[in-house]
Image (cartoon, rainbow, N blue to C red):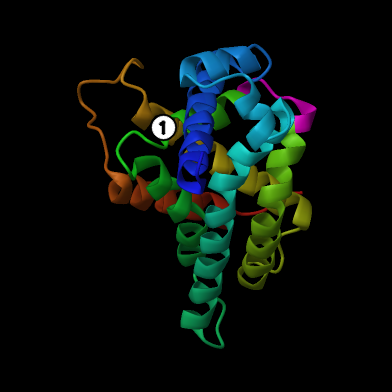
Amino acid sequence: MDSQDQATTKEIILDTAERLFAEHGLDTTSVRDITGAAKVNLGAITYHFGSKQNLIAAMFNRHFGPFVQRTLKLIEEAEQKAGHKPPKIEALLEALMRPIVEGSFCAGKKNIPFMRLIGRCQSEPSPEIQQLIRSHMEPIFSRFATAIHRVLPVLPREELFWRMQFVMGAMHRALLVSSRADLPFPKEAKKLDAEGLLRRLVAFGAQGMKAPYTP
């Protein structure tokens, strides 16, 4: 097996694992389920990943790695564009959410299984998986909190934490609704593209971030 075949097999395993994990859950899906659906031998997971836990980590790494780098870059660009003044909250929220929103819409349906898996991880929390996700997201949240503190210096860190949770929760729910054809959708509403959804999320989130603080 040459290096190209190995890379292809590895990607097939990762794609299949994402789909099955999203459909059935991380604990319920076995290594045999993955190799059977991927049509590879059982030793392929051991060869490429070593264990199921390493496979799960690799699955998150391939999505979060590029996402984290792009988000940090967009936050930095928003600050640079503002010059000596604090950046607008809207610009920082767009930097925070654009990579996630665009990632859920790009490449057709390729990213949908992973987005559904993230939603499942939120509704069926596992301490190990939450720690894995947190390790990826911590640099973003820390950088975003520092940038927001320049805009809203009177907002305590604890309050900022909760407002960020509300904003991210709204975004994940909106992305779930956008990606699921089987969820009820009112006739008076229409499906949004990435830019339409992002514009509304930024406007909604900015008002929440700027809301008066009551201890």
Which residue is the site of mark 1?
112
Q: Which residue appears at 70% of the width and 26% of the height?
A: 52
Q: Which of the 4 image quarters holds residue 113?
A: top left
Crowd class of label 1 (few under 14; some 14 to 19; many from 20; radius 10 Å): many
Whether residue 46 is visible here, answered yes or no, is yes
Q: Which residue appears at 29% of the width and 38% of the height?
A: 108
Is 177 positioned to the left or the right of 206 in the image?
A: left
Dot 1 falls on a residue whose secondary structure is helix
Figure check: 200 above or below 27: below
Q: Which residue appears at 58% of the width and 65% of the height?
A: 72
Q: Nearer the viewer, residue 155 or 57?
A: 57
Is 180 positioned to the left or the right of 33 in the image?
A: left
Magenta-drawn segment: 123-128
Residue 127 is situated, as x and y percent measured from the top left of the image, at: 79, 29
Verify whether residue 45 appears in magenta: no
Q: Nearer the viewer, residue 175 or 136?
A: 136
What amino acid is found at the position of numbered circle 1 in the picture? Answer: Ile
Q: Which residue lies most toward the front here?
A: 1
Is 179 positioned to the left or the right of 125 in the image?
A: left
Q: Which residue appears at 55% of the width and 83% of the height?
A: 85
Q: Nearer the viewer, residue 143 or 83?
A: 143
